[in-house]
Image (tube, helix red, strand yellow):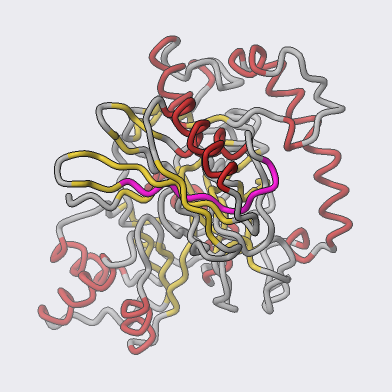
Amino acid sequence: MTDFYDDRETRSADQRTAETARRLPAQVAHAKRAAPAYAALLADLDPHEASLAALPVTRKSDLIAAQAEAPPFGGFTALGLADVPRVFASPGPIHEPQGAGPDPWRYARALHATGLRRGMLLHNCFAYHFTPAGMMLEEGARALGCPVFPAGPGSTESQARAAAHLRPSCYSGTPDFLKTILEAGDALGLDLSCLKLGHVTGGAYLPALRSFYAARGLTVRQSYGTADLGLIAYESEAGEGLICDEDVLVEIVRPGTGEALPEGEVGEVLVTTFSTTYPLLRFATGDLSAVLPGASPCGRTNTRIRGWMGRADQAAKVRGLFVRPEQVAEVMRAHPGLGRARLVIGLDETRDTMLLRVETSVRDAALVQSLAATLQSVMRLRGTVELLEPGALPNDGKVIDDTRPA
């Protein structure tokens, strides 16, 4: 098969659903049995009867707290430290184990969709120290049978000279650094026409960059992944959204909750991974995205998302207290049947203000008073309430809008 990494990418919805129904209970049982943190979190749950929505959400703050209490991994791994090939540290700090076996972050699939094939040299400009980005792309390339030049970031002139000598076919790194290398090569009079492909992540891939690479005859595609989860979704030749990896389950939920949102609605990305080493369940990335309708024109049939659309962890401090999306969700749960809500934080001269804007077809002063009372009870702060027509709030996933001057 030349167009697809494997036949799993083109499965029918029924085939994919059937595999998920088999794999998810087994993964939950594995996490409960092998990872002490999940043994506690899932103590009252039968893995073979629980739905995905019934599983608790795991947040980065949970990992940070657990790792501080029980270093190095807080009990979320299924392997002991002696059995982990490498350990990494990301901002937080959060420490991640490398999974066992080849391509543990599953990046071969994304690189294959970019066009990387056996024998092509990858010029890898992701960092190899502290964070796993460099190894994530290297392991994926090696799984495809590709040699790797571990360039790392920085030293632009050296990067350009190395590429001119080694003649790599593909770049991997942040979206803008390839442009910097190419322009350095131009200034030095170097021939970098060998670079025909690029795989980028870790930053915004802006339209102007796409146009720059296309004008130079490069095919540059992006992916979305994290140090904790590995590959989440990747771009194909269709260029219409990002296709979810075959070895994760992706949900879009209302920020601060585990409540699934309908197709097209912007919300927080939750990911369940089938890693046997690091079996994260419903892991909240803190990123915003939305599910795109239908399947990709390229023939891959898995769910597509719009890509990174901002951050979901929108906590803000008001009059000395933090307010969080989870608290807005708690207010709304006390008043079922309403639409979207947004807490707008402002400034009246020197005093912080809060305005809860709520979509509803109801126009009732009693509802306004009841919402205001719930808001004060949950937030421990007074605020006002405004009722809006359904659809009045933007579909951007924003739950807390801090409008105060920076």
| Residue 77 image position (x, y, % from top left) | 56, 22
| Residue 40 image position (x, y, % from top left) | 64, 12
Residue at left offset 65%, top offset 46%:
248
Q: Is residue 294 magenta?
A: no
* Relative to 304, 155 lies left or right: left
Q: Nearer the viewer, residue 180 or 334?
A: 334
Residue lying farthest to the front in this orientation: 365
**Residue 376 higher or lower than 220, as above or below:** above
Q: Is residue 337 magenta?
A: yes
| Residue 358 image position (x, y, % from top left) | 53, 51
Q: Is residue 136 visible?
A: no
Residue at left offset 52%, top offset 68%:
116
Q: How many marks?
A: 0
**Residue 238 higher or lower than 265, as above or below:** below
User: Residue 301 falls in which quadrant of the image?
Assistant: bottom right
Q: Nearer the viewer, residue 184 or 165?
A: 184
Residue at left offset 89%, top offset 57%:
14
Residue lying farthest to the left in this orientation: 188
- The N terminus: image quadrant: bottom right
**Residue 313 higher or lower than 263, as above or below:** above
Residue at left offset 25%, top offset 70%:
165
The magenta segment is: 336-345
User: Residue 259 falls in which quadrant of the image?
Assistant: top right
| Residue 160 image position (x, y, % from top left) | 20, 69
Residue lying farthest to the bottom in this orientation: 215
Q: Is residue 174 visible?
A: yes
